[in-house]
Image: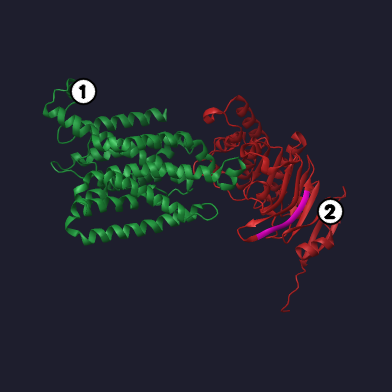
Chain colours: A green, B red
Amino acid sequence: MAFLALLALCVLAFMFSVRFGELRLGLPEIVTTLWRRDGGLDYQILWHIRLPRVLLGALVGASFAVSGVILQGVLRNPLASPGIIGVSAGGGLAGIVVMVLLPRHGGAMVPAAFAGSLLAALLVYVLSWKRGVSTIRLILAGVAVSAMLGALSSAVLLFNAEKAGGVLDFTIGSLSTRSWRHVEQVWPYMALGLLMAQALCGRLNILALGDDVAVGLGLQVERVRVALLATAALLAAAAVSAVGLLGFVGLIAPHLARMVIGSDNRFLLPAAALLGATLVMACDSVGRVVMPPSELPVGIIMAMVGPPFFLWLLRKVSYEA
Amino acid sequence: MKLEVNKLTGGYGAELVLDGVEFSVPSGAIVSLVGPNGCGKSTLLKLIGRVLRPRAGDILLDGRSLSAFRGGDCARCLAMLPQHRHEPAGLSVGELVAYGRFPHRHALGLLNDDDRRIVDEVLAMTRLTALRSRHLSTLSGGERQRAWIAMTLAQTPRLLLLDEPTSFLDICCQFEIIELIKELNARGGTTVLMVLHDLNLAAACSDQMIMMKERKVYCAGAPRNVLTVQNLRAVFEIDARVNYDDAGCPYCLAMGSARKRDHA
């Protein structure tokens, strides 16, 4: 039942998002325009600009949200979000380096950010290894590596201040000017990550009870943990490389879903994916309509509207830590 | 299930916590491990429960070496309640107990009728049926402990390892837990090895006691042979009186520390 509501919400956000923006068409018009494929301006805008943007937003939201659910479970910490294992800082640094130092190779942006994110996550994992990984070491290594990579990013920006303007979009998280090419570049990784997550979520339930309990229940703790961390890193890396350092979805979507669905990750995961997609699509639409003709990046709307809404929910729903 | 421990040595990294530990637990017995803090009781339980790997020595379940078991096979006959565990926010009693069926899981991780019947039985036995949809965070300490024990029971183990199952509980809850363990043992013949800090509770409920001191087993056997004035002085460094109840079961009254004070 709750699932149907979440699904309906997601579909609503999708329709809202396709409908509103610089070009406003009624839903029947949208359907007929897309159906006729007449090549007119409306069609061009809808098919080449609006649809890939909305779809990418949904994919990114779902990826960040599922990545957040996995990390909150693996690290047994409700504050965990995709940024904690270094993916944001790593993707950020790689993206900034490409944009500022190699401006001619704009096409390398997504793969570079993707590789940077994964490398940073790997570095965090290796640094926290000592006869197995402890969650505390992992969190602290993540914070330390993120700080270091963030400082490097700042240094690169500082020495290239004149080119820093274009980078701002990326560091806030933005869906503007995203096209089918971006969707093509990231969707296979996201699909793979979402499938892996769904396959592993039963084991995530067991791992969340603590290492000792999980061993007692016959779980191969280190192996499952590394598989889950790799999945979370893959999803977050793909998302970061597509829209930049969009924060907050990966933190709040899991909590919102938990309030609706409960703590069983087998149901929590798809619910969080739907909610994450809904949030990003909704925030992006709002950013497009609040102050036309210019638009606010989705990251700004998310960070402005998200926290008050989240805090209101926290107070409304009884929620033991 | 019979448990044999041979010349077991192990610890954390370079630190040696157990050195040549030997004992055996007969099938169907309730055995408690006692000893001062830091003597290696919990480490011993972790080695048997496969949380730690032994440096040397062997652990045998019904004569078969623990290292010869695959992880899942082992979890189907051996369950462990560790001290350190995590309760995710929003976890309900019913969900936790159902996780005990994880080693027996089927395709897609779904519960079948057998699993559901076992979960219902375990909830009834631990008197948690009425609380099954309550969140763990809303329960009292005793109820919470029963819920965790219920999870290990849902594994349908033949050997149950419990690390301080009665710590931090009031005296009535302590007895509830012990009576639950005795009932389980009498009904299904489950062998129980547990760490207890309350010496009198351990003496009253165990077939055998194992007293540990400084990484080794100091003595083992029936409670009246283990709980003696001499052993309490040697192992716990206390002056104690030991008496016997009507059934001949020993109980002790600690009179004070017998630790030598160098500066005095």
- Side of A42 where A159 appears, left or right: right
Judging from the image, mark 1 belongs to the subunit labelled A
Give the residue drawn at x 82%, y 61%: B231
Q: Main secondary structure of the magenta part?
A: strand
- Side of A102 where B240 appears, left or right: right
Residue B31 position, x and y percent, is: 77, 47
**In front here: A17 or B13?**
B13
Q: Where, by quadrant of the figure, is residue A147 drawn?
A: bottom left
- Side of B90 where A56 appears, left or right: left
- Side of A321 where B77 appears, left or right: right
Tell me the kind of residue under disc 2. Pro
Q: Nearer the viewer, mark 2 or mark 1?
A: 1
Part of the protein shown in magenta:
B16-23
Determine whether B157 is above or below B229 in the image. Answer: above
Residue B22 in magenta stretch: yes
Disc 2: which residue: B250
Q: Is residue A259 visible?
A: yes
Kindly report the distance in space between the C-alpha atoms of the residues bearing marks 2 and 1: 85 Å
**In front here: A172 or A79?**
A172
> Looking at the rendering, in which quadrant would you find the N terminus of chain A?
top left
Disc 1: which residue: A31
Residue B70 position, x and y percent, is: 63, 38
Judging from the image, mark 2 belongs to the subunit labelled B
Give the residue drawn at x 83%, y 51%: B221
Tell me the kind of residue under disc 1. Val
